[in-house]
Image (cartoon, rainbow, N blue to C red):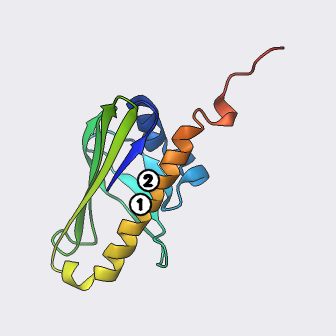
């Protein structure tokens, strides 16, 4: 899924990698923590629309600042239900194109169609919220004060 953000890639990148702020704006990934560096594990709490929340611990597999952020997670044992998620940022004349991709694999994938549909909707909601967040960047709490 792709969303156009009328802000430069550095703004979208700051929003995507500011995990503590997810609780302020992200309706799908309601909590995230960890270090967005290759090889590090993250803690991600998702709450899919119409579904139950869950926390998983994916490993960061790719980081190219202001361009690519990717992780790989498993449900229990690798090969059962695995997911690779990527956020790709591309500069455009009017801002940034954000594309999210999710590739699922494993034995349980055919049994998880409802979960996968809710997950897709959750990421769509996240894109819309990120678009809104970028439009009001920087957040009010970090904007410099002006003197009169």
User: Is residue 85 toward the left or the right of residue 95 in the image?
Assistant: left
Number of numbered discs on residues: 2
Q: Is residue 20 left or right of residue 46?
A: right
Q: Is the residue marked by circle 2 packed among few (<14), some (14-19), or many (20+) residues within 10 Å?
A: many
With respect to residue 138, does 132 lie above or below? below
Element type at marker 1?
helix
Query: Residue 145: image x %, image y %?
Result: 74, 21
* Whether residue 71 is visible: yes
Nearest to the observer: residue 29 or residue 147: 147
Instruction: Residue 26: give x, y in percent of width and height.
Output: 53, 55
Query: Is 70 in front, or is 147?
Result: 147
Q: Is residue 58 left or right of residue 142?
A: left
**Classed neighbour count for the residue bearing mark 1: other residues with Cα under 10 Å, few (<14), some (14–19), many (≥20):** some
Residue at the bottom extreme? 111
Furthest residue to the front? 93
Q: Nearer the viewer, residue 128 or 66?
A: 128
Q: Are marks 1 and 2 in contact (CB under 8 Å)?
A: yes
Residue occupying the point 30% across, 48% down? 99
Q: Is residue 122 above or below residue 131?
A: below
Across and down, in percent, residue 57 comes to 35, 59
**Residue labelled with disc 1:** 124
Tell me the residue at 53%/60% (across/down): 27
Label annotation for residue 101: none
Residue, disc 2: 127
Secondary structure of residue under mark 2: helix
- In the rendered image, which quarter contains the N terminus? bottom left
Q: Quadrant of the C terminus?
A: top right
Q: Marks 1/2: CA distance?
A: 5 Å
Query: Which residue reaches farthest right?
Result: 148
Q: Report whether residue 65 is seen.
A: no
Percent of width and height locating residue 76: 27, 72
């Amino acid at each position: 899924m792709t969303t156009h953000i009328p802000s430069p890639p550095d703004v979208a990148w700051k929003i995507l990698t500011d995990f503590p702020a997810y609780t302020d704006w992200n309706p799908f990934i309601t909590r995230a923590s960890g270090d967005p560096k290759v090889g590090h594990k993250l803690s991600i709490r998702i709450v899919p629309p119409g579904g139950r929340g869950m926390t998983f611990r994916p490993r960061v597999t790719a980081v190219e600042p202001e361009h690519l952020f990717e992780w790989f997670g498993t449900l229990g044992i690798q090969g059962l239900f695995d997911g690779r998620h990527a956020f790709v940022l591309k500069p455009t004349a009017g801002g940034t194109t954000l594309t999210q991709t999710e590739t699922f694999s494993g034995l349980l994938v055919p049994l998880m169609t409802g979960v996968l549909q809710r997950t897709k909707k959750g990421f769509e909601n996240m894109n819309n919220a990120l678009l809104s967040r970028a439009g009001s960047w920087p957040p009010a709490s970090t904007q410099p004060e002006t003197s009169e």
